[in-house]
Amino acid sequence: MNKASVGKTDKISKTILDFGEPLLSEAITEETPIAVVREVYKLVVLVWNAHVAATSHRGDSSYLQMLQQLAASPQIPSEGRAWIERLSKRWREEFTDAKYCVGHWHIKIKDDDTLNFFCDAREAPDDNQSAEHTKAPPLRTSAKSIFQISHKS
């Protein structure tokens, strides 16, 4: 049993914050522009969704293959590649029994300038569905995002 199964009553947003914590705490400061904050969260969701889809009962490894291609892209700086590898390792070590992908998500800035992350859970897509059904971030956007994050944070 790992972190995804321990708190079965936990909201997926809490699980995603726990999963992404190493990257979120390293890449986001009070001075980080909200656009960059969104890109950091987008990367966390992308890695999460790729791994869940690959290990779900449907076993669709195409999302994980796309993530690996993204990480190998020459456009991705070494910091972005390291974040993908670190989050992937964290997922394999602590979250392998997760059953749900992240669907729609958004970040809201509260009046006290704190961030709130909201998301919904979706079943992992099967072979006949696309990433659009789980609202996983498009890989092109994420590749650009990783490049922007590593140069702005």
Image: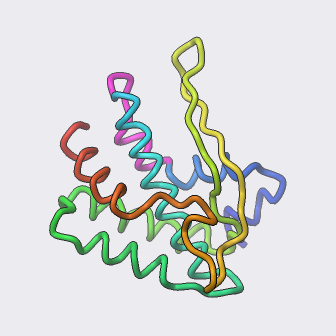
Q: Which residues are magenta?
A: 21-32
Eyeballing the image, is 31 above or below 134? above
Query: 49 or 137: nearer the eye?
Result: 137
* Residue at the outermost left position: 74
Q: Quadrant of the N terminus?
A: bottom right
Eyeballing the image, is 55 above or below 118? below
Residue 149, x across and y down, in percent: 28, 44
Eyeballing the image, is 29 above or below 103? above
Residue 116, x across and y down, in percent: 60, 31
Residue 38 lies within the magenta run: no
Name which residue lies at 69% across and 63% down. Answer: 4
Is 30 placed left or right of 110 in the picture?
Answer: left
* Residue at the outermost right position: 9
Is 59 placed left or right of 146 in the picture?
Answer: right
Q: Quadrant of the C terminus?
A: top left
Residue 120, x across and y down, in percent: 71, 51
Eyeballing the image, is 70 above or below 138? below
Name which residue lies at 58% across and 28% down. Answer: 108
Q: Which quarter of the picture shows residue 78? A: bottom left
Residue 99, x across and y down, in percent: 71, 71
Is 67 placed left or right of 52 in the picture?
Answer: left
Is 83 placed left or right of 102 in the picture?
Answer: left
Name which residue lies at 64% across and 64% down. Answer: 101
Q: Which quarter of the picture shows residue 143? A: bottom left
